[in-house]
Amino acid sequence: MRNNSSLLDSVNRYGLISRIFHWSMAVLFILQFGIAITLYLSGEGALSDALWPLHQQVGFTLFLLAFLRGIWGILNIGRRHHTPGLSGKLAAAGHLVIYALMLLVPLLALMRAAGDQYGFSFLGVEIFTPAVVENTALTAPGNAAHSLLGWVLLVVIAGHVVMAMLHHFVLGDDTFRRMIGQESKR
């Protein structure tokens, strides 16, 4: 039986549950942004018709995981390592931006789906029935901001990866080690 402390975060490392959230979402974001880039480059046609449903399913999965991960993070906030000073404040602000975008981008898509003629189903379960008449109060925010904020999220995630590599290879601290489950050297 796994020790309960290995499931939870600590000052020395992230627990198993946090790591599963982080790395499964990382894989799904690679898939999602690969789909988004392909959709952007391919334009309308058979390929985009095939990829849109996958984009929606992966996006909703990421939304659910981000919501659950946010709750898990709040429950573990007191157990985690906190970097003091300005760099710690900047890291916290960066994480808040990532979480806000991980929730806002799919929420805008869901609003759009609630008001458009297509509706939305997740894994075969209907979430929103197709609207008979488009509700622009719901579709306009998604039409205006979903794609733009999705690309902003990609840039912010890329910055997150760059900072993780900077911490590991340049600063030589334990930030990356904690996220792969290894104990801090300190």
Image (cartoon, grey):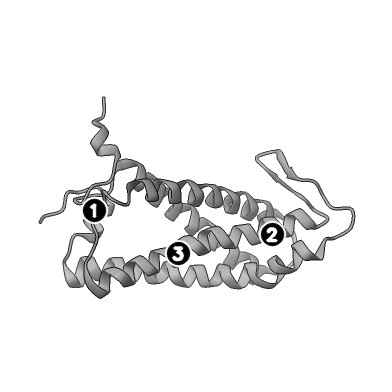
The answer to whether residue 15 is left or right of residue 106 is left
**Residue farthest along the left direction in this orientation:** 186
Mark 1 or 3: the one toward you: 3
Of mark 1 and mark 3, the one earlier in the sequence is: 3
- The residue shown at (23%, 56%) is 81
- The number of numbered discs placed on residues in the rendered structure image is 3
User: Residue under circle 2?
Assistant: 47
Secondary structure at numbered mark 2: helix
Q: Residue 17's spot in the image, x, y percent?
A: 35, 42
The answer to whether residue 96 is left or right of residue 122 is left
The answer to whether residue 103 is left or right of residue 166 is right
The span from disc 1 to disc 3 (Cα, nearest Å) is: 19 Å
User: Residue under circle 3?
Assistant: 98
The span from disc 3 to disc 2 (Cα, nearest Å) is: 29 Å
Q: Quadrant of residue 20?
A: top left
Of mark 1 and mark 2, the one earlier in the sequence is: 2
User: Residue under circle 1?
Assistant: 178
- The residue shown at (29%, 38%) is 7
The answer to whether residue 10 is left or right of residue 18 is left
